[in-house]
Amino acid sequence: MGYFVDPVLVLVLLANFFLLGTSRLRAIINGTALQGVLLGILTLLVHHELSLRPVLIAVGTTVIKAIVIPWMLSRAMREAAIVHEVEPFIGYILSLMLGAIGTGLALLFVGTLPLVPQHVGSLLIPTSLSTVLTGFILLTTRRKAITQVAGYLVLENGIFVMGLALIEALPFFVEVGVLLDLLVAIFVMGIIILQISREFASLDTTRLSALKE
């Protein structure tokens, strides 16, 4: 199954560019859900032999990242009655350029790392770094709180991919703990988003700085 790891990682990278280039919140939510499905598949592919534990982790990853969290974000979007990300701090073309440059630098940087033989030539580490960068761009350059939450999720997806590269060196329960922490964080963020939309009728985070006592 290891032969299918890199093609799935290419799809993760394509999802990164899709997220950087779209302004529709529904598309952003669907993009994060797609990444959740791909990460669930990767969890199975990186194991040479299937057992109950990786299957459970793969199912849990898919349910949390591809179903539960996107559903919460979709509900927040409906409650706030918004459809588009409006006027990001940097444009979509520049975001795509930064993503492309970051991906290229990640590919070059990996060549300097002392990787174990099975990871030499693999896209696991470059995809991890590129996905973290994509999440950081979404988190810091978008105005809508829902998009920023999606950026946080994408950033964690990159960390998850890095964990898959180190799966034999790190205990598997650490990844489960990260997923549970992420679920709690997104749940809290969802509550905050709904409260903001009810109180201020806007999810533009730049307006919060204008509030006075």
Image: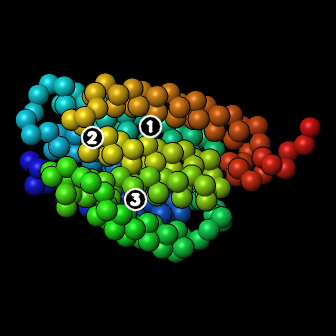
- Of label 1 and label 3, which has the lower sequence position? 1
Question: Which is in the foreground here, disc 1 or disc 3?
Answer: 3
- 187 versus 4 height, above or below: above
- 89 versus 190 height, above or below: below
Secondary structure at numbered mark 2: loop
Task: Report the residue at 39% width, 44% height from top.
Answer: 159
Q: Which mark is residue 69?
A: 1
Spatial CA span between label 2 and label 1 = 25 Å
* Residue type at numbered disc 3: Ser
Whole-percent x and y of residue 75? 52, 39
Task: Report the residue at 7% width, 35% height from top.
Answer: 49
- The residue where tag 2 is placed is 166
Asked whether the viewer can see residue 142, the reply is yes
Q: Quadrant of residue 195?
A: top right
Whole-percent x and y of residue 198? 71, 37
Task: Report the residue at 19% width, 31% height from top.
Answer: 54
Q: Crowding at label 3, few (<14), some or many (≥20) Cα neighbours within 10 Å?
A: many
Quick check: marks 1 and 3 in contact, CB under 8 Å? Answer: no
Number of marks drawn: 3
* Residue type at numbered disc 1: Ile
Secondary structure at numbered mark 3: helix
Secondary structure at numbered mark 1: helix
- The residue where tag 3 is placed is 130
Question: Which is in the foreground here, disc 2 or disc 3?
Answer: 2
Whole-percent x and y of residue 183? 46, 30
Asked whether the viewer can see residue 31, the reply is no
- Of label 2 and label 1, which has the lower sequence position? 1
Front residue of 154/66: it is 154
203 to the left or right of 131: right
102 to the left or right of 111: right
Whole-percent x and y of residue 83? 57, 55
- Of label 2 and label 3, which has the lower sequence position? 3
